[in-house]
Structures are given as C-alpha cells and as structure tokens.
Amino acid sequence: AARLLVTAVAAVAAALCALVRARRQRRHARCEQASQQAAKALDGSARHLLPKLIWEESHAAEAQELLREQLSRGHAFLGDEGHESLCSAFVVIVGLDSGVGGHAAHMLARGGVRALRLVGSSTVTRASLATDAVAVAKDVGRQSGAVLLESLRRTVPDVMVELLDAEWQEENPASSDREDQIAALAPLRSATPVPGEHPGESGRVRLVLDCLSDPAAKASLLAACALLGLRAITVGQVDGRADLTRWHTGALADALPSDPSLHSTRALLNKRTRALADARSLDVLAVYSSEMLPHTHPDSLGSWRAAVRGPLAAGVGQIVALAAIAAVTARQPPPQLPAKVARVVLRRLTTRLIARERRLYGTDAKQLVKMLPDETLELVCLTGWGMRCAITAEPLDSRACNVELVRRDKKLPASAGNLLLLAAHLAHAHDEAPEGTRIWTEADDKRIARICAALGGRRHSPLGPHAHPKVRSGLTDVVSD
C-alpha cells in the first residue's frame, strides 16, 4: 500500500511538472512569434521598445487564457450561445445600501458579465460591515460603490464597471435627480462593438436589478424600465427575514403579498402605469420571501425591521445573481406556485367573511367585495396578521378552517383597519360577546390597535417607514382606479 501511495504521488508530481513545462513552452512560442512580428513592423529607431511590447503581448495572452479558464464551468453549462450572451450583457444595479446589490454585482462579475453599472450613494458603516460584500474595517466612512469598484478591479480586472454616485428618487424628483435617473439607464458610455451584435445595440442596458428598499422609488424605477423597454428584476424586503429557504423567483404579478415592499410597489406601479397591477404587460421578475413577518414582536419594530442578517443578504444577492444570469441567457426556470396556493386560501377566508357579514350585520355581498378588494384582503391577512390568530398567534392550517376574519369594532363597517384574524373558537366568542366588551387582554388590545391603525392609515405603522400613504389607506382608491 505504501509503494502504491508513493507511486501515485510521483505520477501526480510528474503530471504537474509536465503541465507547467507545456505552459512555459506555449508562452515562449508566443513570445517568439510576437518578437518576429514586432521586428518586422518596427524600424531601427524603435528597436529598444521591442522587449516591452513582447512582455505586454505575452501578459495579455496569458490574461485571456486565465479568463477562459475562470469562465470554463459556466461556459460548459450555458453553451456557446448563452455564454456569449452573458459576456456581452450590460447590467445596471440600482441600490447598494442593503448589501444585496453588492453581493449580486460581485457574483455577476465573477460569473461572466463584462459590463456593470453601480448606482448608489450609501457609505460604509460599522453596522453595514455585517452585510457588505467586500468592505473591511478600514473602509468605514467611504462610499460603498467605490469600495466595491476597487474590489472588482482587483478580482476581475477585465470587467468594465461604471459608478454613479446618486440615489434613485421617487416621483417628482429635482432636475439634478432627473439627470441622474437618465444617466443610470443610459447606454454604456465607453461601449465598444461586441462581436456578433449589431453596433447600434452595443452598450445598451440588457437588465436592471432593483435592489432599492423604498416602494415609491422601486415603482418609479420599474415604471422607467417599462417606458424604455428594459427588463428588470426587483428584490423584496430583506430586513426582518431569517429563512433563506423561503425565497422565491417569479413574476411580480404572482409575488406573495407577504412581502410588504413588493405589495406596495405593485400597487404604486398599478397607479403609475394605469394598468392592472398583475405586471404581465411589464417584463419584471420578482425575488421575494414567503416568510411571514411576526406581528407579536415587541414595540421596538424600527430596530427589528432594520436588522438585515449578513448571511441572508449574501444569500439573497446570490439568488438575484442567478436570476439575472437566467434572464440574460434565456434559461429562465418555470414559475413557482406558492402565490396560487395563497390566493386559494384567501378566497376561502373571504367566502366565510361574506357569510358572517350577511348573517350578523346584513351586509350586502357585492358592497362588501367593492369595499374590500383582493389586494386589501391580502394586505390584512398576510402583511398585517401573517396568516395567524391575532391573539394566540395560531398559524393558519392548510385548509384555512381554523381562523376567521371578523370585525374588531362591531359598530364600524368591515375595512382594512377593522378586520382581525381570530381562531375559529375565539371568533365565535367575539361574535357572541356583549356590545362594548372584548375577549382579549389590555396588552393584546394595544398591539391589535397599533396594527389596525397601520392598516387603516393612521400612525405607528408596523409596515415600516417604507409603506406608502396609498398602501396605508387600505389600497381602496388605488385598486378602484
């Protein structure tokens, strides 16, 4: 056994030596060929430049060989056509503050994208070191985009990277912000014709990655992409999430409303485009989470919502990079189905709510459907209460039989700010309770009042500072448009 081990080690060492010798011979042959060609082209006065030219030629050839070896696995997976499409793509990444954009840019550059534009003006802080893709302690105080740009030039020096130090603003921006928005989606300024591509298309934006956190800014960016005919991938809310396995990729129309950021973006985009918010007329892909945000969390909602875990930001960034590569190379996976399942469950809850309203309050079914459209019920059940009982936090079962939608205040009509999800036995007890009495504790009442106030458009929104006023008002006027 010892002899066999020694023989195997010797064989491996011999193979490595032969490989190094062959590489040196190829490099020497290229240098000789370059020397002969340069000697023919140069006159006697420029002979002293010959060694430098030969070194530069050899170095460039070696860099190209290393690049081909680096991209060889992706080339084998994508094929010649897909690999060429990926290498010729120009991708714009808007938003670097959450860490997702930086991780996505890093993986796209390593994966084969040769042209990137980074749009963002966030700075590196001690707290952001936990989520930043490449920043270290000495980078605190510097611009995140500049740090990422330097890292990409060291890691993949052949990638062309542009940095735009600006934040994408929401509607009605100032003139300077409007100029930054135009520059963000403009063709690559230093573009050169790509082999096999029409010269007029060289440098044109192929894909936009929306890594912003403000729904109003996201809707503005996606509307601009729709106007320019650009494909886009939008990322849902990352803060407050804990489970990377619950992230999905699919059309924006099918995104689960458990993601408050995408839910608000879809509603605002609906109003901007004056079309149905299913986004099927828009080429928008969504990366979102089906993880329910807890509604029983303590009052420190601001610090909790701002908590983005470093591993989660890195994982979501890699998911976004994979989705971008699939979109650019036309290898998009089939759509997923969690949204369809959620809509079936919501339909059952709505049917029982209509029956309860008709039995207890004599509410007309058509009037109730008009007052509570689908998106409002999605906002209440998924974003507001997380498909759990508002008192016991009991989760919804697979048949949606253990919880009910009920009025919080029986004197007021059913609306986004006056609906609760209660366990079935608690819902019946609430219906039978005398007027003016509650079946929950004072602490529960304060928490329920806070969430209902947010859903109804008043203060202390658990949806966070990013919730748009139209969303906080129950989306009634948006949907009715």
Image: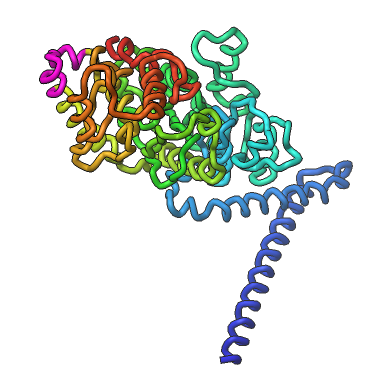
Residue drawn at x 36%, y 32% is: 258
Residue drawn at x 19%, y 17% is: 369
Q: Indicate whether 470 appears above or below 46.
A: above
Secondary structure, magenta segment, majority class:
helix
Residue 414, image quadrant = top left
Q: How many numbered circles are shown?
A: 0
Residue 179, image quadrant = top right
The x, y position of residue 377, in whole percent, is 27, 23
Q: Indicate whether 382 appears above or below 168.
A: below
The x, y position of residue 466, in whole percent, is 48, 22
Residue drawn at x 64%, y 82% is: 10
Q: Which residues are magenta?
A: 355-370
The x, y position of residue 119, in whole percent, is 59, 26
Please state, as top left, top right, bottom left or bottom right, where the N terminus lies in the image: bottom right
Q: Nearer the viewer, residue 468 or 37?
A: 468
Q: Nearer the viewer, residue 341 or 183?
A: 341
The x, y position of residue 411, in whole percent, is 24, 12
Left/right placement of residue 46 relative to residue 467 reads: right
Residue 360 is a magenta residue: yes
Q: Indicate whether 22 appears above or below 475.
A: below
Residue drawn at x 41%, y 35% is: 294
Q: According to the image, what is the colour scheme of the structure? A: rainbow
Residue 49 is a magenta residue: no
State whether residue 265 appears in this view.
no
Please state, as top left, top right, bottom left or bottom right, where the C terminus lies in the image: top left
Left/right placement of residue 160 relative to residue 439 reads: right
Q: Nearer the viewer, residue 447 or 249?
A: 447
Q: Nearer the viewer, residue 203 or 54?
A: 203
State whether residue 134 appears in this view.
yes
